[in-house]
Amino acid sequence: MAAQTEYKFFEAVEKSFDKAAKFTNWDPGILEQIKQCNSVYRMFFPVKIGDKIEVIKAYRVQHSQHKSPSKGGIRFALSVNLDEVMALAALMTYKCAIVNVPFGGAKGGISIDPKKYTPYELEKITRRYTSELIKKNFIGPGTDVPAPDYGTGEKEMAWILDTYTSMRPGEIDALACVTGKPVSQGGVRGRREATGLGVFYGIREVCNMHDMMKKVGLTPGVEGKTVIIQGLGNVGYHTAKFFREGGAKVIALAEFEGAITNPDGLNEEEVFQHRKKTGSILNFPGATNITKSLDALELPCDILIPAALENVINGENAPNIKAKIIGEAANGPLTPDADEVFIKKGVLVVPDMYLNAGGVTVSYFEWLKNLSHVRYGRMEKRFTENMNTHILSQIEELSGKTVSKKEKEFILHGADEADLVYSGLEETMITATKEIIDCWKSDDKIPDMRTAAYIVAINKVATSYNELGIFP
Ligand code: GLU
């Protein structure tokens, strides 16, 4: 069994970074600069909750500014701490580099249990946090752009936007100060499901690689594969949905209160509704309960997807895991000890900083939309449809044949916002997968896909620092 080492999260990220840096030739000074968190802001602010004043602890960390703005979500959880925010900010730097999104990495967090507050209280906390960020220039379309993360969503992003715009009246690009907004507030269609869809595209691409599947003893393709997902939040829910729609079988779902399993497959929407109604994932009709939630991760399956929090698979439970592929939809769900176990066992670990990059990729599309002040597809949708109608009628006339109604609809359709966002995301994930796998194959000493992903990221960030030059 692997040695039990307790890593702090940021240390674990540094460890993976160092493992990969050995395969590069960059100046040690540049590597050291990349590793550091450039700006760390820890704040305390008072908020009146009922008739008491509560002192709230919060953070925003900008890990890198080799590209501006820096980018990353804001997490609301009692467990939020500086080490976690620093690690998550660092992962954002590498994530953005891998998917060629021109941002530095950042992350924020408020150390609260959001379930303990009313929506009005949460709004007060979010708005006060935003004004603290504004005061220190830690938010803005060209400096630092937050987004949703664990415990936050569209609603919080709308409060951030509203606070920002009221404190910066007349700023023409203010809408781009935050992403993951509701569509009615400048959000982009497809952002909500983006991370889960990216996870699906990423794993599907790996599953389509015959040599990769041979390595783990599986047949190519996603269809028919058995999947276990931990977490039924935004990421877990959408990951489950796209896998089910792609022909895979989600045989177990795990949450805090326990897990459920059904070898015939679970429908995420039905489970979600059941949990909403009863307050628990357990006792779902047709499924078997697993009272100790983590036990579900050890069931036999093809693909295991941790989509909740960090450090859930470590040196202790990794040897019991039977999955052939692990897709890190969450940030940092595996410790470095777990990585070592899986390298030995020949399990393919598809790493977080690439696999869950769908969220920030579509955030980039949203940011571009906000800066351009126009909805995707608005200028060309009708033009494409008119042109396609003309081409098709010419084909029909010249061939004397008619195309079926269904085919006609498909051919004539001009791309709308959701089409363009989905296709931009698909292209991004496919390109990133190929780049990482090519790097992995380029040297048989590279032990795993995570190290290959770090090498790709380090090379991109280091090139950027190198070309910028170091300020004398
Ligand atoms: N919080 C998400 C992540 O960890 C999204 C970040 C963003 O869209 O900026 O990647």
Image: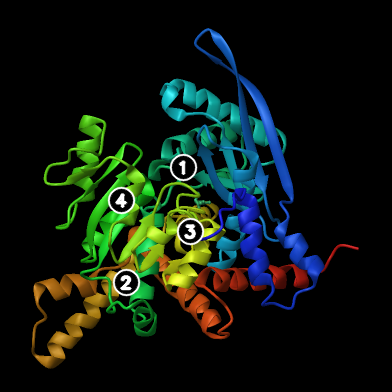
Q: Nearer the viewer, mark 2 or mark 3?
A: 3
Q: Residue at x 21, y 31 (%)?
A: 278
Q: Is residue 215 among what the camera can see?
A: yes
Callout 1: 10 Å neighbours few (<14), some, many (20+)? some
Give the number of callouts. 4
Q: Which of disc 1 and disc 4 is earlier in sequence?
A: 1
SS of the residue under disc 3: helix
In the image, residue 396 sits, relative to residue 104, either above or below, namely below
As measured in the structure, the alpha-carbon distance from the residue carrying label 4 to the one carrying label 3 is: 36 Å
Closer to the camera in the image, 124 or 379: 124
Residue type pointed to by label 4:
Ala
Q: Is mark 1 within 8 Å of ligand 1?
A: yes
Quadrant in the rendering for residue 345: bottom left
Residue designated by label 2: 384
Residue type pointed to by label 3:
Phe
- CB atoms of marks 3 and 1 within 8 Å: no
